[in-house]
Image (spheres, rainbow, N blue to C red):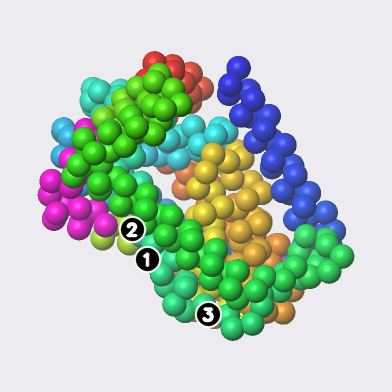
Amino acid sequence: MKKYVFGAVGAVLMALMLWLLFRNTDWNEVGAALGKADWFLLAISLVPLFLSHPARVKRWSYIVRAAGPATFRQMFSATQIGFLANMVLPARAGEVIRPLVLTRLTRLPFSKSFALNAVDRITDLFGLLAVMAVSLLAFRPTEGLSIPAETFGTDAPITLTAEQYFGGAISAGVGLIVIAAAFVGLYTNRRLVLAISDKTIGLVSARAAEIVNQLINQFADGLHVFRSPLDLARSTLWSLITWGLNLVGLVIAMMAFDIDFPWYTAFVMQAILALAIAAPNTPGFVGPFHIAIVLALVMTVPGIDINLAKAFAIIAHLIQFPAVLVFGFWFLLRDDMNLFQLQREGEAQAKQAS
């Protein structure tokens, strides 16, 4: 029942965001912008996007190998099927399906696979923090940022002051640092974290505190990567490479649309995009993805034609699909798995853990 609720909420959010962004769009102008795009360059932009997927698996390999034997192919399969699930299923179902596939292929306990997936997100945060740091250092507006009225069909432009921009960006960065630090603290002093959990959550519900403590212990068991500083450094390096490949893909795609953008636009775009799709979201991130791309363009490229920005947002979203679909369906067929069966098993595992 819960998955149908998530699906319905995701569909409503998707429809609302698409309506908000495209309700007053001049589709003739959007079509003209698409017609002028350099499709050869767009095809080239797929290359770094394809390469980012094995790079992401290489990053994860330095974490998984600390817990037990797993081949690159097994990790690749788990990662790509998880990505495919995030693309077509609601509520970021891939975050449960990815460790479930790893457990199927390697016989690692699901709790450990789930924790290893969470640890991978920590090294992923290091790459995102680097992107956000470059964005803040390079893009430093001294005046208010104006979101043109035609962006969302408002009566007047939406103005964002420089203070609001920096305040929001810094708050997001601090939040990510706190999350990463919390995981590190969990490994270095698990007892303290459990004691804090008992004293805070336990005041509300002893059962809730028990569940949270169980999850804390599962995560802590997966933090073996911190036993090897070298593996952590290698994983972080591959995180930077992964984010770099995504940035290159965005840059080439913007060149295909002949957008006159400053060098830091891709960094701002990637930072906003990552925050927009971080939480449980719409299927395929339809809506939040497009809004993030358009906002990044109107913020960093003043005076850009809004129809050009929307046309680029559509294509920037579509070019994310080929690698996910090709790799995802290949491994589903190769390993004889069913995405919806994995979804049901993942829900059962999550229910059992709680």
Above or below 31: residue 159: below
Amino acid type of the residue tagged 1 in the rendering: Ala
- Magenta part, dominant SS: helix
* Residue occupied by mark 2: 126
Q: Residue at x 26, y 30 (%)?
A: 217
Q: Secondary structure at mark 3?
A: loop
Question: Are circles 1 and 3 on residues that touch, CB within 8 Å?
Answer: no
Which image quadrant is residue 134 in? bottom left
Comparing 239 with 275, the one in front is 275
* Mark 3 or mark 2, whichever is nearer to me: 3
Comparing 203 with 332, the one in front is 203
Q: Secondary structure at mark 2?
A: helix
* Residue occupied by mark 1: 130
Amino acid type of the residue tagged 3 in the rendering: Arg
Above or below 228: residue 160: below
The N terminus: image quadrant: top right
Comparing 203 with 207, the one in front is 203
Disc 3 packing (10 Å; few <14; some 14–19; many ≥20): few
Q: Is residue 55 visible?
A: no
Horizontal side of 25 relative to 122 (left or right) equals: right
Which image quadrant is residue 296 in? bottom right
* Residue occupied by mark 3: 140
The C terminus: image quadrant: top left
Amino acid type of the residue tagged 2 in the rendering: Phe
Q: Is residue 11 visible?
A: yes
Question: Are circles 1 and 2 on residues that touch, CB within 8 Å?
Answer: yes
Disc 2 packing (10 Å; few <14; some 14–19; many ≥20): many
Sequence order check: which comes first, mark 1 or mark 3? Answer: 1
Q: Label 1 vs label 3: CA separation?
A: 16 Å
On whether residue 237 falls in the magenta region, the answer is no
Magenta part of the chain: 219-236
Q: Residue at x 34, y 40 (%)?
A: 118
